[in-house]
Image: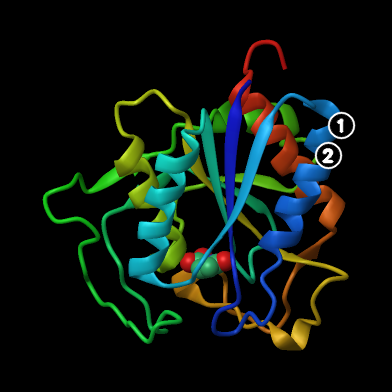
Amino acid sequence: MSTALITYFGAFEGVAENPTQQVAEYARAHLEQTRPHLNLVLAELPVAFDTSANELRQLIKAHKPDAVIATGVAVGRDKISLERIAINCDDARIADNAGDQRQDTPIIGGAPAAYFSTLPYRAIFSELGNTYPLEISNTAGTYVCNHVFFHLMHTLADTGIPAGFIHIPAIGNSLIPQTLTAHQDTGGVEGKTVPMLPLETVGGVLSRAVELTLDPIAS
Ligand code: PCA
């Protein structure tokens, strides 16, 4: 039986309710139907540099997943972003939920400057990119999402376990626009209007990403 880990985030500055939990739960409900034998673990990570990375490592140790997809919201983006690259840098104008504000801070001293996602993002994009609002993104920002993405790739480097990060836009129906603030640091695009996508669209793409990651040929 395969095990997949999906992480999502809780609330943080400018995002009173993080839609990634709903999206992860949508994917679980969907995958229960399409992959009844999959052991899918969902876990919330705190929006805090230090604790997020520690909790992620513990989850990987405890569940020994065959694939890991971390998710976060990038308020202001209008497409689901298959993140290609995590960089070894924390730098944000907003503090994390623990009050930790970082500038030009290496995430792991001595580690590579960057890691590439090992999710099959090209295959996911090729299959879904014409139908869904989807992009391959070259920046996950420099806030907690990129931080978790970097630790994820560092932890699983050379294991052959596929892992990566997907940023989602705001989800319609679940959030009132006024409660959301787009932050450049989080990969969002600052502006007056906040694009939103339906839960079914984003949850459907995440589900298919899990399937293509676990079983790229048979899927
Ligand atoms: N988005 C933020 C952190 C948590 C989240 O959901 C980010 O993009 O860094």
Q: Amino acid at mark 2?
A: His
Circle 1 — which element?
helix
Q: Is residue 28 left or right of residue 116?
A: right
Q: Position of residue 90 (x, y in %)?
A: 30, 67
- For label 2, the SS is helix
| Residue 196: quadrant of the picture | bottom right
Asked whether residue 51 is in view, the answer is yes
Name, please, the residue furthest toward the top.
218
Q: Which mark is residue 173?
A: none
Q: Position of residue 215 (x, y in %)?
A: 64, 18
Tell me which amino acid carries mark 1.
Gln
> Given contact means CB atoms under 8 Å apart, are the residues at marks 1 and 2 in contact?
yes
Q: Position of residue 11 (x, y in %)?
A: 60, 76
The residue labelled by disc 1 is: 33
Residue 188, percent across and down? 56, 69
In the picture as drawn, the residue positioned furthest to the left comes out as 110
